[in-house]
Image (tube, rainbow, N blue to C red):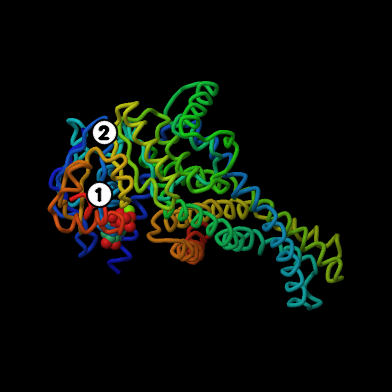
Amino acid sequence: MLKFLAKLGLYFTLLKKVFSRPEKPSVYYKQTLHEIVSLGLNSIGIVMVVSFFMGAVITLQTAYNTENPIYPTYLIGLGTRDSILLEFSSTIVALILAGKVGSNIASEIGTMRVTEQIDALEIMGVNSASYLILPKMIATLIFNPFLTIISINVGILGGWLAGTMAGVITSEDYIYGIQYAFIPYYITYSLIKTVFFAFIITSVSAFHGYYVDGGSLEVGRASTKAVVHSSILILLFNVILTQLLLS
Amino acid sequence: MIRVINVNKSFDDNKVLDNVSVSFEPGKTNLIIGRSGSGKTVLLKAIVGLHDIDSGEIWYENVLFNKLGFEEMKEIRKEMGMLFQGSALFDSLTVEQNVRFPLDMFTKKSMEEKTDRVNFCLNRVNIINANRLFPSELSGGMKKSVAIARAISLNPKYLFCDEPNSGLDPLTAILIDELIKELTEEYSMTTIVNTHDMNSVMEIGEKIVFINEGVLCWEGNKDEILKSDCAILNDFVFANALAKQLRASGR
Ligand SMILES: Nc1ncnc2c1ncn2[C@@H]1O[C@H](COP(=O)(O)OP(=O)(O)OP(=O)(O)O)[C@@H](O)[C@H]1O
Ligand SMILES: [Mg+2]
């Protein structure tokens, strides 16, 4: 328990260091663009693949679980849309990104720690925490909402393809269903969650990487811890945010 | 001038620095020698502020360095260059970008001026035609040289080197040692070098301090070191067979 509190303190000390005044904005700007490419653009592929198949399977499952003549089939479209909006494109995509982006951040920063590159930054008078972490944070906070939007669209597309090809729903019904009783606030809700989750992924992973002590073995461990801890926090905050935003 | 006064440092129960006091003079190559695990790296990192110390004082000229906040420390750190045990070049940057990094961060020079300075520094350490290579494409000796070039790119007043020649062949090791010594004289830097290599000691040691298990045991220059009557130091100095023979024949 005491150890946990000490870790928590360390985490907030790090955040304070991250958000202190940057020494040269132009350098940070360039780094942020670089991170948008390496953490954001490079994640589009996996997000699209996962979203496509999840959209497909959600449609099929909704269809097979509601095989009942009194339900109009357009409800399958509606069910797919709401599952994707409410849970899938924010939470599940965040969990997948925690695996991809989180381990990437923790091992990159952790390697810099054990090879003394962070010490080298410090000795030059660079605020290493801010220089290494802030651009990653800004990049994911800006870019992850786009990933969510991409995921929503690709998921709904996947549902449409799977549903029509398997013959469980007609194209017209699906399209009618995804527009039926649409609540625009669900998109806002999804995007708010995404922003929180992006912050969790980058800050928790960076924390584990930044305080690695030892060698490459510890870097591996830090990267595993980064994924596990950010996933758990994402699930926890999913409950909290849902209660706050939807009640 | 860097002064270390009564510095103590422990990791948990392990006392690594025990009341160390020593001063280092400008324009000289100062050596810290000692066996593996004796606390050399910890002392050097304490001097530059990478390790917090438990008690004691570290002075740069007339500034009490270890009590400064991050922002004030930064001003002095801009005058420091440091060469790490494993070179610590930035993996994701090319040789040229590595050496230019401090210039990008802390100067308002034009790209052309910066490139000139980078090439000057790389030439000075004899690294030619490697500007576009990445650190992973360099040999250990080249990495050390590039790291030296990066350390001197802002014309530092203080240069710190942690085992500059570990892992290098004897000839390259001597080249690196001499480079450090020449640069120290050229720019009258205060240079502190950690080493356990007796060759370096005899080549470049102008002032030598010997630490053993965190205690500073002996101070002097390279002529005095052969005649000292400190037993632990003698064990260290005359550890290899050749040195033993020299002592036997010289006495
Ligand atoms: N970050 C740390 N945490 C805990 N103990 C440490 C840490 N760094 C060093 N030590 C301990 O301090 C002691 C001195 O280590 P140091 O790295 O200064 O030795 P050294 O003289 O530089 O040795 P070498 O010549 O092998 O580099 C060792 O006992 C080491 O275990
Ligand atoms: Mg060492």
Helix, strand or loop status at disc 2: loop
Disc 1 C-beta below 8 A from ligand 1: yes
The x and y percentages for residue B114 are 50, 25
Q: Which residue is mark 2?
A: B28
Can you see residue A234?
A: yes
- Residue A207 percent location from the top left of the image: 42, 55
Camera-nearest residue between B193 and A204: B193
Neighbour tally class for label 1: few under 14, some 14-19, many 20 plus, Cα within 10 Å:
many
On the picture, is A27 further left or further right than A58? Answer: left
Task: Work out whether residue A19 can be spotted.
Answer: no
Quickly name the residue at label 1. Answer: B43
Q: Residue at x 70, y 55 (%)?
A: A45
Up-down relation of residue A94 to residue B222 (above or below): below
Q: Amino acid at mark 1?
A: Leu
| Amino acid at pointer 2 | Lys
Do tags 2 and 1 sit on the same chain? Answer: yes
Quadrant containing the N terminus of chain B is: top left
